[in-house]
C-alpha cells in the first residue's frame, strides 16, 4: 500500500525537523510546538513509533497529519507531497506531472545502466584479473561452479579505493550518479581517512566477492558484497537507492520465480552462497534474504507466486538469533507503533512472544510458513553439497511453523517428569493460543496432550487462562479472537473488563488489533452512516492509528455532518483512489461477520469507538510516563510538572471512559 511505502521511506523526525528545531531527549525528540504558542517544549516526536504528539495542545499523529496540519493541506495533497519526496508513484491522474514523471524515469534508467556497467566490470574482474585470485579460490572452496559464476554474474571488487569509480567516471558517469547508484561514497563525508586523494568519490565495495541483486524482471538494482579474509562487515549491501529497496528485495527471485510457481513453494535461505548452491543443485525455488530479516514486504511479494513459504533457518545458536531477529523485523513491519517501554520489560517481552510474532505474521499475510529442519551447525550450502538427498527431503517435508515450535521449545526437556511436562505446557500454550483457527488449535492441544500424556480438558482450561492473561495484557483483537475462531471478529461478549488492561508494553503489540477495530468501525459507518452521532462523541480523527482509516473517518464524518441536503459530492467522489483498498477491506471486515440489527450495530460501533479511544489514551499514558521519567532523570522540574499534569488529565479521561464502559454493560 502506497501509504505504508511512503511511511517506510520518510522519517517523521527528519520531516518535522525541517520545520521544528528538535532536540534529542532519550528515545524521543522535543521542540516548541508549531501549532500553539509555548515557551517550554511540549511537542514530542517518537522515532520508534514514527508519531508525534503535543502534550500542550493535544495535537498528534503521524507524518501525514503533521504535513496536513502544518501546510494546511488536504489529505490528497499531503499524499502527493510526501509521495514525491519518497519517490513513490501515486495513482492520481488529475495531478500527475508528465514532465516530472519522465524525469524520474530517466534518472532510474540511468541508474540501471550504471549498475549494469558496474556488474560487467565486477564480473570481468572476477574472471580475469590477477588481484581476484583470492576471490576465485574462495568461490571454488564454497563449491560454486563456473556455470553458476556466470549465471549469477558473480564479480569481484578489488581492494583499492578508486578502481570502479575511475572506470565508471571514464565511461562518462558523474560522481553524483555513482553515489546515487550506491556504487561510490563521497570523500567529504570523511568516514575513511588516509586514502590517496584523487577525486571526490571512492569505491563503495572494496576487496569483496560481489553478488548482483536483481529485481523480479532480472534488472540489476544493487549488489551484495562478501568480505574476503577478515574484512568488516562480512556482508555489505548496496545502500538504499531509487532502485534498491532493501527490505523488500529477495536475492535470486528473478531466477527462482518460475520454479517457485512450479513447485508451489519458496525456500528462503539466509546467505547468497546458500541460494547459489541450492540453484546449482536443482532446488531453484530458493531465494535469499538480503540482510537477516524476513519482513511482511517479502512475503507480500512472494504470495503472488505461492503461499507456501519455507524458511531454512540455522538450527544452531546463530540461527536462533537470526530467527528472533526476523521475528522482530516482522513485528516491526506490522506493528509500526513501538511505544517506548522500559528495556528490561522489552527484552522479557521478546522472549515471551517470540513465536507469537511469527504466527501472527503467518495469519496476517495469509501464507503458510514452514520451517526447514537441517542438521545442527550446518549451513544449507554445506548440507546440499554433503548430502543432497537429505536437503531434498527436508525441502519437501518442512515442518509447519507451530510444529517447529513444538520441536524447538521442547528440546532438552524431560517429558516424563512432572516438571518437564508443566514446563512444556507453559512454553507451548501461548504458542497454541496465537492460532485463531479453532480446528487447528484443537488439533495442537490434542498433540500437546498426547505428548505429555495429560488430559485434553485440563489443557483447554489452562489455555483459557493463558488467553485471558494475554487479553489482559494486550487489550486485543487477536487476543480474544481465538476463542471464537472467527479470525478476529469483535463481539459484544468479548469486550474485556477494564481491569488489568492498563499495563504498559502491551500496546505496541495491540497495534494490529487496533487497526482491525478501526477497519471494523469504518465498515460499520460505511454500511450505516447513521451511526456517526453515536461515535463522534467518543472519538475524533486523532484517535485513529491508521493513516488510511483516519482519513476515511474524517471524510465519512464530514459527509454525514453536512447532511444529504447540501452536499453535491458523495462519499465515493471524496475518497482518494489510494484509499479505495481500505474501503474494500473495511467493508469486508463487516461482511465477514454475522449481520447485526440496528441496536447491535450501535452497540458494536460504540464499543469500537470506546476501545480506540482507550487504546489511544493508554498509548499517550505510556509515552507520558516515559517522558516524565526522562525529565526526572534530566532534572528538568518544569517539564516534569507539566507532563505530570498531562498524565493526570489522561488518567481522568481513562476513568471517564471506564465508567462509561461500565454503564454500557
Ligand atoms: Zn501544541
Image (spheres, rainbow, N blue to C red):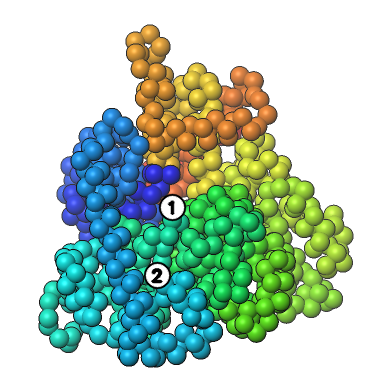
Question: Which residue sits at x=15%, y=86%?
Answer: 196
Quarter of the image holding residue 605? top right
| Residue 638 point in image, percent of width and height | 24, 56
In the image, 560 versus 261, the foreground residue is 261
Of the 4 image quadrants, the one containing the C terminus is top right
Q: Secondary structure at mark 1?
A: loop
Residue 212 has which mark?
A: 2
Of the 4 image quadrants, the one containing the N terminus is top left
Residue annotated with mark 1: 337
Question: Which residue sits at x=44%, y=32%?
Answer: 580
Residue 476 has which mark?
A: none
CA gap, disc 1 and disc 2: 34 Å
In the image, 543 versus 583, the foreground residue is 583
In the image, 502 versus 322, the foreground residue is 322
Look at the picture and state if 552 lies above or below 459: above
| Residue 365 point in image, percent of width and height | 57, 50
Q: Is residue 63 visible?
A: no
Question: Which residue sits at x=79%, y=71%?
Answer: 421
Do tag 1 and tag 2 residues touch (Cβ < 8 Å)? no
1 or 2: mark nearer the eye: 2
Look at the picture and state if 386 lies above or below 556: below
Question: Which residue sits at x=65%, y=59%?
Answer: 263
Q: Earlier in the sequence, mark 1 or mark 2?
A: 2
Amino acid at each position: 500500500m502506497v501509504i505504508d511505502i511512503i511511511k517506510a521511506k520518510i522519517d517523521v523526525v527528519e520531516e518535522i525537523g525541517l520545520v521544528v528545531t528538535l532536540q534529542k531527549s532519550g528515545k524521543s525528540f522535543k521542540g516548541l510546538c508549531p501549532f500553539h504558542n509555548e515557551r517550554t517544549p511540549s511537542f514530542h516526536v517518537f522515532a520508534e513509533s514514527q508519531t508525534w504528539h503535543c502534550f500542550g495542545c493535544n495535537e498528534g499523529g503521524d507524518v501525514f497529519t503533521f504535513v496536513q496540519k502544518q501546510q494546511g493541506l488536504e489529505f490528497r495533497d499531503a499524499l502527493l507531497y510526501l509521495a514525491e519526496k519518497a519517490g513513490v508513484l501515486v495513482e492520481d491522474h488529475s495531478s500527475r506531472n508528465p514532465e516530472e514523471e519522465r524525469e524520474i524515469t530517466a534518472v532510474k534508467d540511468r541508474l540501471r545502466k550504471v549498475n549494469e556497467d558496474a556488474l560487467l566490470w565486477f564480473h570481468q574482474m572476477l574472471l580475469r584479473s590477477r588481484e581476484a585470485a583470492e576471490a576465485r579460490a574462495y568461490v571454488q572452496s564454497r563449491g560454486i561452479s563456473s556455470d553458476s559464476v556466470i549465471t549469477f554474474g558473480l564479480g569481484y571488487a578489488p581492494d583499492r579505493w578508486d578502481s570502479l569509480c575511475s572506470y565508471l567516471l571514464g565511461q562518462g558517469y558523474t560522481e553524483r550518479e555513482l553515489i546515487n547508484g550506491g556504487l561510490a561514497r563521497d570523500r567529504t563525508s570523511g568516514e575513511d581517512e588516509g586514502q590517496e586523494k584523487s577525486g571526490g568519490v571512492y569505491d563503495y565495495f572494496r576487496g569483496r566477492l560481489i553478488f548482483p541483486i536483481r529485481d523480479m524482471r532480472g534488472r540489476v538494482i544493487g549488489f551484495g558484497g562478501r568480505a574476503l579474509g577478515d574484512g568488516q562487515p562480512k556482508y555489505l549491501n548496496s545502500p538504499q537507492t531509487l532502485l534498491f529497496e532493501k527490505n523488500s528485495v529477495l536475492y535470486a527471485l528473478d531466477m527462482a520465480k518460475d520454479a517457485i510457481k512450479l513447485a508451489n513453494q519458496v525456500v528462503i535461505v539466509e546467505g547468497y552462497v546458500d541460494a547459489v548452491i541450492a540453484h546449482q543443485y536443482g532446488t531453484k525455488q530458493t531465494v535469499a534474504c538480503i540482510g537477516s530479516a524476513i519482513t511482511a514486504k517479502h512475503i507480500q511479494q512472494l504470495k503472488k507466486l505461492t503461499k507456501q513459504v519455507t524458511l531454512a533457518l540455522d538450527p544452531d545458536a546463530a540461527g536462533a538469533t537470526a530467527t528472533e531477529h526476523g521475528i522482530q523485523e516482522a513485528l516491526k513491519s506490522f506493528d509500526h507503533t513501538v511505544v517506548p517501554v522500559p528495556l528490561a520489560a522489552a527484552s522479557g517481552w521478546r522472549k515471551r512472544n517470540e513465536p507469537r510474532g511469527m504466527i501472527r505474521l503467518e495469519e496476517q499475510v495469509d501464507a503458510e510458513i514452514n520451517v526447514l529442519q537441517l542438521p545442527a551447525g550446518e549451513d544449507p550450502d554445506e548440507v546440499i553439497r554433503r548430502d543432497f538427498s537429505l536437503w531434498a527431503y527436508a525441502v519437501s517435508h518442512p515442518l509447519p511453523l507451530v510444529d517447529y515450535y513444538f520441536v524447538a521449545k521442547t528440546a532438552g526437556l524431560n517429558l516424563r517428569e512432572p516438571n518437564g511436562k508443566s514446563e512444556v505446557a507453559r512454553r507451548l500454550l501461548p504458542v497454541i493460543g496465537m492460532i485463531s483457527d479453532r480446528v487447528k488449535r484443537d488439533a495442537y492441544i490434542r498433540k500437546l496432550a498426547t505428548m505429555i500424556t495429560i488430559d485434553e480438558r485440563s489443557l483447554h482450561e489452562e489455555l483459557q487462562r493463558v488467553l485471558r492473561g494475554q487479553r489482559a495484557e494486550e487489550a486485543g483483537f487477536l487476543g480474544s479472537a481465538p476463542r471464537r475462531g472467527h479470525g478476529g471478529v469483535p463481539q459484544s461478549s468479548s469486550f474485556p473488563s477494564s481491569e488489568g488492561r492498563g499495563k504498559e508494553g502491551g500496546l505496541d503489540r495491540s497495534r494490529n488489533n487496533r487497526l482491525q477495530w478501526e477497519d471494523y468501525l469504518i465498515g460499520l459507518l460505511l454500511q450505516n452512516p447513521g451511526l456517526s452521532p453515536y461515535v463522534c462523541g467518543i472519538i475524533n480523527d486523532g484517535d485513529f492509528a491508521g493513516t488510511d482509516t483516519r482519513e476515511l473517518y474524517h471524510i465519512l464524518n464530514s459527509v454525514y455532518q453536512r447532511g444529504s441536503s447540501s452536499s453535491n459530492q458523495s462519499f465515493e467522489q471524496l475518497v482518494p483512489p489510494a484509499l479505495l483498498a481500505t474501503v474494500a477491506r473495511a467493508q469486508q471486515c463487516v461482511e465477514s461477520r454475522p449481520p447485526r440489527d440496528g441496536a447491535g450495530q450501535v452497540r458494536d460501533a460504540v464499543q469500537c469507538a470506546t476501545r480506540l479511544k482507550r487504546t489511544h489514551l493508554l498509548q499517550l499514558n505510556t509515552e507520558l510516563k516515559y517522558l516524565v521519567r526522562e525529565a526526572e532523570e534530566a532534572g528538568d522540574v518544569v517539564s516534569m510538572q507539566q507532563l505530570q499534569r498531562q498524565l493526570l488529565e489522561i488518567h481522568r479521561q481513562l476513568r471517564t471512559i471506564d465508567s462509561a464502559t461500565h454503564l454500557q454493560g
